[in-house]
Amino acid sequence: MKYVDDVDKFWTLTLIVETVNNELVEEIQNFQSQDPAIAPLLNLLAYDITPDKNELRSLPLDSRNLWSQRPAIRSHGGILIRWYTTSGT
């Protein structure tokens, strides 16, 4: 029965890790959606909008600095991330 016990422990640990990860993802999404620099970018990315010069000027400086890093910044699961490849780009 050791195998069954090990499998049960594995699935229990997997469930705990998934729960913690989901809670962490939700917390990051919440913080970023309230961040004055990140929230506007998440909106642009969610609707695949490329802002014109006037729209960019209306964004906070931190948002503009982040936007200048396109296409390295992306929205993944509602979280703003900077995408790197193994070549460092």
Image (spheres, rainbow, N blue to C red):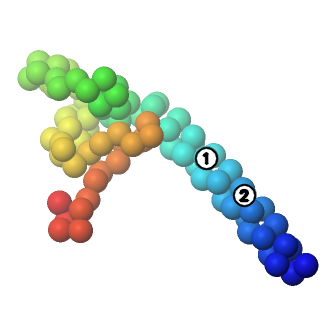
**Secondary structure under badge 2?**
helix
Q: Position of residue 28 (x, y in %)?
A: 51, 43
Query: Which disc is residue 34 wearing?
Result: none
**Secondary structure under badge 1?**
helix
Q: Residue 16 sits in which quadrant?
A: bottom right
What residue lies at 17% left-to-right and 26% top-to-bottom? 50
Q: CA distance from mark 2 to mark 1?
A: 10 Å
Residue 40 visible? The answer is no
In front here: 23 or 9? 9
Where is mark 2, residue-wise?
16
Q: Is residue 21 left or right of residue 36?
A: right
What residue lies at 25% left-to-right and 38% top-to-bottom? 62
Whichever of labels 2 and 1 marks the residue nearer the N terminus, that label is 2
Question: What amino acid is found at the position of numbered circle 2 in the picture?
Answer: Ile
Q: Is residue 18 left or right of residue 10?
A: left
Residue 22 visible? The answer is yes
Where is mark 1, residue-wise?
22
Q: Position of residue 17 (x, y in %)?
A: 66, 59
Q: Position of residue 36 (x, y in %)?
A: 37, 30
What residue lies at 87% left-to-right and 81% top-to-bottom? 2
- Categorize mark 2 by other alpha carbons within 10 Å: few (<14), some (14-19), many (20+): few
Question: What amino acid is found at the position of numbered circle 1 in the picture?
Answer: Asn
Q: Position of residue 75 (x, y in %)?
A: 35, 39
